[in-house]
Image: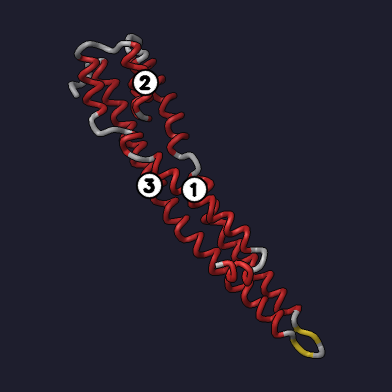
Amino acid sequence: MLEIIKAAGWPIYFIILCSVIALAIIGERIWSLRRSLIAPENLFNEVVQAVRGQGVSPAFLDDLARSSVLGRVFAAGLYNIKSSREVMKDAIEDAGTTAVLELERFLNTLGTIATVTPLLGLFGTVIGMIEIFASQSPTGGNPVQMAQGISIALYNTGAGLAVAIPSLVAYRHFRKKVDVIIVEMEQQAVKLVEVVHGERRA
C-alpha cells in the first residue's frame, strides 16, 4: 500500500483525506439513522395511550423528548396540548425543522466528496501527464520520469473513482432513507394533533 501511495505522488493525499472523511461520515450515519434512535415503531401508540390515559406530565414529556428524534417532535406538540390546533401544529413544525437538520447532518459533505474525488483524480492525471511531457527532451526521454508520470496519472484516477463510487452510493442511500423517515414523521405528527383534538381515534 505504501508503495502505491508513493508511486501515486502527492495528489493522492487529497483523495486519501476524502476517503477517511467519507468513511467517518458513513459510519456515523449508519449509527445515527437507526430506527430505534429516530422513530421507534410503537412510539405513536404509546404516546396516544398516555394522552388518553393518565395524561401527559412534565416528567413524561421530558422522557419523551430524550427518547428519540420523533419523541422530541411529539413532545414539542404536547407541551402545547392545551393550546389550539394551530399552536400545537406550529410547535411540531418548528421541532420538525430542527429534526430534519439533524437527520441530514453531514450528507452534504458526503455528496461533495462523491463529486470532488473524481475531479481530484483528474487533477492527479493532469499532474502525471505533465511529468510525462517533462520526461521528453530533444536528446531523448527519461524512462524513469515517464514511468512515474504514468503511475501518478493512473493511480490517482483509479483512487478518485474508488472513493467517489461508494460515497455516491452511500449518499443516495442515506438521502432516500432520510426522506422516507421525514415523511413518516410528518404523518405521525399530523395524526397526533388530530387525535389530541378529537378529530380522529388513532
Q: Residue furthest right?
A: 138
Task: Inspect the image, locate mark 2, and give the three-letter code of the amino acid beneath it.
Answer: Lys
The circle on residue 126 is none
Rounded to the nearest angstrom, the CA distance separating label 1 from label 3 is 19 Å
What x and y, as percent, mark residue 16? 57, 58
Give the labeled residue for mark 2.
89
Task: Inspect the image, locate mark 3, and give the three-letter code of the amino acid beneath it.
Answer: Lys
- Residue at image coords 47%, 55%: 167
SS of the residue under disc 1 = helix
Task: Inspect the image, locate mark 1, and give the three-letter code of the amino acid beneath it.
Answer: Ala
Give the labeled residue for mark 3.
176
Label 1 neighbour load within 10 Å: few <14, some 14-19, many 20+:
few
Q: Quadrant of the N terminus?
A: bottom right
Q: Nearer the viewer, mark 1 or mark 3?
A: 1
- Residue at image coords 34%, 20%: 63
Question: Could you tell which of marks 2 and 3 lies nearer the N-terminus?
Answer: 2
Rounded to the nearest angstrom, the CA distance separating label 1 from label 2 is 36 Å
- Residue at image coords 37%, 24%: 66
Figure check: 153 above or below 36: below
Question: Is 169 left or right of 202, judged from the image as shown?
Answer: right
Give the labeled residue for mark 1.
24
Question: Is 165 left or right of 150, judged from the image as shown?
Answer: left
What x and y, as percent, mark residue 145? 71, 79
SS of the residue under disc 2 = helix
Question: Is 114 left or right of 53, judged from the image as shown?
Answer: right
Question: Could you tell which of marks 1 and 3 lies nearer the N-terminus?
Answer: 1
- Residue at image coords 63%, 69%: 6
* Quarter of the rendering containing residue 132: bottom right
Rounded to the nearest angstrom, the CA distance separating label 2 from label 3 is 25 Å
Label 2 neighbour load within 10 Å: few <14, some 14-19, many 20+:
many
SS of the residue under disc 3 = helix
